[in-house]
Image: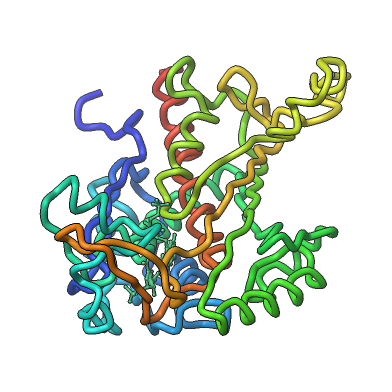
């Protein structure tokens, strides 16, 4: 079918640096005819943007959405859709004193090794700021998924060893850590504030639940759905691991316990987390990711400078004392894009 976008994959790439002029995204494979305006994307940007609470970086970015292409008279055209977000609150001088030093845990040393040149202004491309552009693309994928009856929801389940004991979906967007248990959220906030005052940071766990996805999504054997979700999640800065369903607990379970048995209503349990053999089963797809503690901290640490001399470093500036709250919308965005992409691949397979 020449000229048709039928079967085209949902793809995106981002551009921009934390202290450059702007960041943005180019998305390909957007189904034509979808009603889309800047507000549809802005809603998701507003969930991720910095400077909204005591547990996030105070940097104030509004992440105002500008659609540059791919939408005509309020509908997507099927051509590359691009979104730009201007940076407005840059403060590169915060990095002047440490521009010749490598921050432990951040990408300064490894970027220098790879490129031999580094935008030292706030980690450049390795900055969490890059994820704003992903959220814009995720908002488009989410709209396409809504038409398919798929919903994607992530939430914090653990911060600094404090775990959620209850699950209250309505509380998630109302507490600044986006925890699913408001009682645990209060303790998490107190702990993050305390650590930030001490010049330290902490990590945690974020869970994601995809509901309503059809059975049959996933491309074995190399592009299994769980493998694709894992790659998408691990491509987000600070995400260090992922488990599906019962995850690592499977190691101590018996086959008779872990197998998801079936009856006439479908699966009785969901230990697999909704994916078996790399293909969705129709059950909720559930995974958890580990978020590492923010690397830029103001406690003195040992490092070296670009000449290899031993130095002591303290990172001043505006940093997230815990990345969990702001990574929640990013995880949802990446999950939306993977699922939408696999719907398109499944359609191409059956065509
Ligand atoms: C939403 C978001 C916000 C982040 N905020 C910060 C921050 O304020 N300071 C910092 O040092 N790292 C922050 N990071 C983490 C860095 O991007 C990440 O640690 C860095 O790229 C290197 O880690 P990696 O090895 O996991 O990629 C953030 C990441 C995300 C996704
Ligand atoms: C600006 C954002 O987060 C930034 C992510 C980040 C990092 O090192 O990842 C460092 C901080 O920014 P700066 O470059 O000013 O030091 C955060 O504020 C954002 O997410 O929009």
Which residue appears at 54% of the width and 70% of the height? 201
> Regarding ligand 2, which quadrant of the image does it lie in?
bottom left
Position of residue 62 in the picture relative to residue 86 (left or right): right
Residue 99's x, y, as percent?
20, 71
Residue 195's x, y, as percent?
60, 76
Q: Is 14 drawn above or below residue 187 in the view shown?
A: above
Q: Quadrant of residue 283?
A: top right
Q: Is 58 drawn above or below residue 75 in the view shown?
A: below
Looking at the image, which is closer to me, 84 or 35? 84
Which residue appears at 78% of the width and 68% of the height? 184
Question: Residue most toward the front?
Answer: 310
Looking at the image, which is closer to me, 193 or 83? 193
Which residue appears at 42% of the width and 36% of the height? 341
Q: Is 28 drawn above or below residue 217 in the view shown?
A: below
Position of residue 291 in the picture relative to residue 222 (left or right): right
Looking at the image, which is closer to me, 278 or 179? 179
Which residue appears at 38% of the width and 63% of the height? 128
Looking at the image, which is closer to me, 338 or 142? 338
């Amino acid at each position: 079918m020449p000229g048709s976008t039928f079967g085209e994959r949902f793809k995106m790439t981002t551009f921009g640096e934390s202290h450059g002029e702007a960041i943005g995204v180019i998305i390909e494979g957007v189904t034509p005819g979808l009603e889309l305006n800047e507000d549809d994307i802005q809603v998701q940007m507003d969930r991720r943007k910095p400077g909204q609470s005591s547990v996030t970086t105070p940097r104030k970015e509004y992440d105002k959405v500008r659609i540059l292409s791919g939408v005509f008279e309020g509908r997507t055209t099927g051509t590359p859709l691009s979104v730009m977000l201007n940076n407005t609150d840059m403060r590169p001088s915060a990095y002047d004193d440490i521009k010749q030093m490598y921050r432990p845990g951040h990408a300064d040393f490894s970027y220098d090794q790879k490129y031999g040149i580094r935008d030292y202004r706030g980690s450049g491309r390795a900055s969490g700021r890059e994820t704003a552009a992903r959220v814009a693309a995720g908002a488009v994928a989410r709209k396409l998924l809504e038409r398919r009856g798929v919903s994607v929801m992530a939430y914090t389940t653990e911060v600094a060893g404090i775990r959620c004991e209850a699950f209250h979906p309505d509380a998630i967007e109302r507490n600044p850590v986006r925890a699913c248990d408001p009682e645990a959220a209060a303790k998490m906030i107190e702990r993050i504030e305390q650590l930030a005052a001490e010049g330290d940071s902490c990590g945690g766990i974020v869970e994601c639940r995809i509901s309503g996805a059809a059975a049959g999504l996933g491309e074995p054997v190399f592009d299994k759905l769980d493998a694709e979700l894992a790659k998408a999640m691990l491509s987000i800065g600070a995400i260090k691991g992922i488990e599906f369903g019962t995850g690592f607990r499977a190691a101590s379970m018996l086959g008779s316990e872990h197998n998801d048995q079936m009856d006439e209503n479908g699966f009785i349990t969901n230990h697999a987390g909704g994916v078996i053999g790399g293909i969705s089963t129709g059950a909720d797809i559930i995974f958890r990711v580990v978020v590492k503690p923010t690397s830029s901290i103001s406690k003195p640490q040992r490092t070296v400078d670009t000449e290899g001399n031993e130095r002591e470093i303290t990172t001043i500036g505006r940093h997230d004392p815990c990345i969990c709250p702001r990574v929640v919308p990013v995880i949802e965005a990446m999950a939306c894009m993977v699922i939408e992409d696999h719907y398109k691949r499944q359609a191409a397979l059956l065509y």
